[in-house]
């Protein structure tokens, strides 16, 4: 058992305060806008904190730590690519500025504004399915981290997963986006301090020379150069850069922070400043993973190695603070993601089929029910599903299932006058086909003919999905201009708020 009584006290007190505040702010949820986009009142400083906290859950540490353990320093390229993508979107306002101007609550709302209801429904379904599958491993990996770092071992996994789920769903369902942004600021401050202190401890107890020697002897050049690393290469770099740009502009949990901002200018600032933190978000847990490789060697479970290292090295008090911060960050990630996917299914699929839509009270209630069902799915899926390759690859290929088609559909809708509903449908469907095929066929790769082997290469599959989506939009739109003329957005009527 790594956890001392002091660590338990720190964790319990901090989590209790977080949950109490999350439920307490329920009184400020007065309407649908308040529940889903916090009434569009988020200023820059709070937006930066909540965005960073949303994308910094325990699962983030686990899959980045795993990459550090199995690839060495070469995985640091991922943090650099994320920094480039998010700061570019923030500085230029690519997509997010226009979506905020139009007052969108979800990405598929734009599909109906620019195309038609059918595109909105199909896009909403793909976003919902891809998003829920994307977070399907969160609960399991958080459970693995906590069971190892606290010293319980794998036998406590199911209990920890269930306990976390109950806490998260309680204040997410009740408080909506207000609960998320208020508690996120606390988590941002606590976790920033804990990450800095943890990194210092790791550097003090695992000599940097030992780490460098372990990487060069264990991985050779592939431990430093991502181009020659068999897990990466040029196709990986191009895919991840495009995916990060698409995710920065269109990944609903993150984009909701822009849509919650008080103005388009604030939305751009939130993304630009937050983008500067994304390199550290990736590289710090990656470094802990590399240190775990140097400390334990190559024989450990790649997922558990980094949490085991922290459990052994961190002193009393700091371990409790780090775990409390990561637990709270996980709550932020879960709540943002669950709220994003449940609101998409409610607003962009279910409500579309109701003439005149549902009342705001009923819409909130449907969103809450779907949130609960998503939570139940996460528990069952996390206990059952076996991750192919590394968790990072799974996270990005499931995200690509949505972002590939969405990038072509939204970008063309905003910046190309000839984009029409047929092109949008083609982009959305073709962008989802290859990632879905990878997830299904990866476990049956030995049964596939040689010419189809590319489907089970995650880097090729991810990159190809963006190519197909772009071709679908361009070819589909150009071939059907007469039968399906493009809809031009009326600037005066294009406001949802």
Image (spheres, helix red, strand yellow):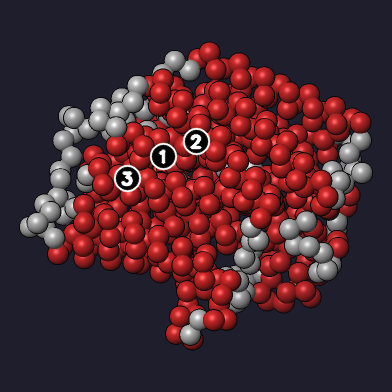
- Horizontal arrangement in the rendering, residue 10 relative to residue 481 (left or right): right
In terms of image quadrants, where is residue 55?
top right
**Mark closest to the chain's N terminus, 2 or 1:** 1
- Mark 1: few/some/many CA within 10 Å (<14, 14-19, 20+): many
Does dot 2 land on a helix, a strand or a loop? helix
Can see residue 52? no
Does dot 1 land on a helix, a strand or a loop? helix
* Label 3 to label 2: alpha-carbon separation: 17 Å
**Mark closest to the chain's N terminus, 3 or 2:** 3
**Mark closest to the chain's N terminus, 3 or 1:** 3
Tag 3 near tag 2, CB within 8 Å? no
Q: Position of residue 368 (x, y in %)?
A: 50, 29
* Label 2 to label 1: alpha-carbon separation: 8 Å
List the residue tagged with mark 3. 121
Tag 2 near tag 1, CB within 8 Å? yes
Q: Position of residue 105 (x, y in %)?
A: 37, 33
List the residue tagged with mark 1. 345
- Mark linked to residue 1: none
Q: Which residue lies furthest to the bottom in this view?
A: 450
Q: In this view, does 71 lie above or below 254?
A: below
List the residue tagged with mark 2. 370
Q: Observer-nearest residue: 139 or 295? A: 139
Residue drawn at point x = 82 percent, y = 64 percent: 300
- Horizontal arrangement in the rendering, residue 228 relative to residue 430 (left or right): right
Residue drawn at point x = 44 percent, y = 85 percent: 451
- Mark 3: few/some/many CA within 10 Å (<14, 14-19, 20+): many
Q: Observer-nearest residue: 354 or 234? A: 354
In terms of image quadrants, where is residue 179?
top right
Residue drawn at point x = 64 percent, y = 48 percent: 380
* Quadrant in the picture for the N terminus: top right
Tag 3 near tag 1, CB within 8 Å? no
């Amino acid at each position: 058992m790594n956890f001392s009584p002091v660590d338990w006290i720190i964790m319990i007190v901090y989590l209790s305060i977080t949950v109490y505040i999350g439920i307490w702010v329920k009184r400020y949820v007065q309407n649908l806008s308040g529940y889903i986009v916090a009434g569009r009142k988020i200023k820059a400083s709070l937006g930066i904190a909540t965005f960073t906290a949303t994308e910094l859950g325990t699962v983030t540490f686990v899959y980045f730590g795993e990459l550090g353990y199995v690839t060495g320093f070469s995985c640091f390229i991922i943090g650099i690519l994320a920094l480039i993508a998010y700061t570019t979107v923030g500085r230029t306002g690519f997509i997010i500025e226009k979506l905020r101007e139009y007052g969108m609550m979800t990405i598929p709302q734009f599909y109906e504004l620019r195309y038609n209801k059918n595109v909105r429904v199909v896009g909403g379904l793909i976003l919902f399915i891809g998003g829920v599958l994307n977070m399907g491993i969160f609960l399991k990996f958080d459970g693995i981290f906590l069971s190892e770092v606290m010293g319980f071992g794998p036998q406590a996994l199911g209990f920890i997963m269930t306990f976390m789920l109950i806490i998260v769903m309680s204040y997410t369902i009740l408080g909506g986006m207000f609960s998320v942004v208020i508690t996120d600021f606390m988590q941002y401050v606590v976790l920033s301090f804990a990450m800095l202190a943890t990194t210092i401890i790791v550097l003090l107890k695992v000599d940097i020379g030992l780490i460098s020697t372990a990487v060069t002897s264990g991985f050779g050049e592939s431990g430093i150069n991502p181009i020659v690393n068999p897990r990466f290469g040029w196709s990986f770099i191009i895919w991840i850069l495009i995916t990060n740009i698409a995710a920065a502009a269109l990944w609903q949990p993150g984009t909701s922070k822009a849509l919650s901002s008080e103005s388009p200018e604030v939305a751009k600032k939130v993304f630009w400043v937050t983008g500067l933190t994304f390199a550290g978000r990736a590289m710090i847990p990656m470094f802990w993973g590399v240190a775990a490789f140097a400390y334990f060697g190559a024989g450990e479970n790649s997922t558990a190695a980094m949490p085991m290292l922290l459990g052994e090295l961190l002193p009393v008090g700091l371990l409790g603070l780090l775990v409390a911060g990561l637990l709270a960050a996980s709550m932020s990630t879960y709540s943002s993601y669950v709220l994003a996917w449940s609101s998409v299914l409610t607003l962009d699929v279910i409500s579309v089929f109701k003439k005149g839509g549902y009342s705001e009270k009923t819409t909130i209630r449907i969103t809450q029910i779907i949130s609960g069902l998503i939570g139940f799915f996460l528990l069952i899926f996390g206990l059952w599903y076996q991750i192919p390759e590394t968790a990072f690859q799974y996270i990005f290929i499931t995200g690509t299932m949505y972002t590939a088609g969405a990038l072509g559909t939204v970008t063309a809708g905003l910046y190309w006058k000839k984009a029409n509903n047929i092109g949008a449908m083609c982009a959305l469907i073709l962008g989802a086909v290859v990632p879905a095929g990878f997830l299904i066929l990866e476990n049956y790769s030995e049964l596939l003919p040689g010419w189809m082997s590319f489907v089970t290469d995650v880097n090729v599959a991810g990159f190809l999905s963006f190519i197909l989506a772009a071709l679908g939009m361009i070819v589909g739109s150009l071939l059907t201009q007469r039968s399906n003329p493009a809809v031009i957005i009326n600037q005066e009527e294009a406001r949802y708020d």
